[in-house]
Amino acid sequence: MNDAIHAIQQTIVLYGQLLDDLRMEEWGRLFTDAAVWAMPGFVFEGREAIIKGVRAMEPERPGYVKHLAFTPVIRVDGKDRARAWTDLLFLTRDSFDAPWTTAIAGRYCDELVASDGGWQFALRVADIAPDDPPAVSFERGPQFPPL
């Protein structure tokens, strides 16, 4: 189980690093073919739609945004399924010499599946507006204590 948790953490961290570097082809491989990505006002279904939709939200070149993920809470369900909840910060800046500004704070709520290439997102929800949840079904946080 520790190997699965470590691999899931790698997927979660790579999400931000690859997206910040605009390495969209590699970033897209973090999602299953039928994955769903959602945040308030947006739902993208399928890997290609996710890549296209999220890329349209990003700046033209790297260095102007930073997706930061904190230590996740991970629940592994059997050999090939897991859920994760990761607090997040999204930073932006207007130029390379400008200070970073916090644009968004929230939580990623994920469902992941194991594949030959590692762990992939089947569902990734950015829960960033408590009064405006994304239009998909998701768990806002883990049960405590763990079952």
Image (cartoon, rainbow, N blue to C red):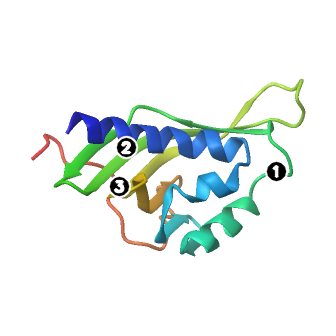
Question: Which residue is under mark 3?
Answer: 140
Q: Quadrant of the N terminus?
A: top left
For the residue pair 91 and 55, the one nearer the viewer reads as 55
Q: Position of residue 140 (x, y in %)?
A: 35, 55
Distance from the alpha carbon under mark 3 to that under mark 1: 28 Å
Mark 1 belongs to which amino acid?
A: Pro
For mark 2, give the secondary structure: helix
Give the label on residue 8, or none.
Answer: 2
Residue at 56%, 65% (x, y): give it. 40
Looking at the image, is mark 2 or mark 3 earlier in the sequence? 2
Q: Is residue 1 left or right of residue 68?
A: left
**Which-is-in-front pick, marks 2 and 3?**
2
Above-or-below relation of 126 to 36: above
**Which-is-in-front pick, marks 3 and 1?**
1
**Residue extending furthest front?**
116
Question: Which residue is under mark 1?
Answer: 59
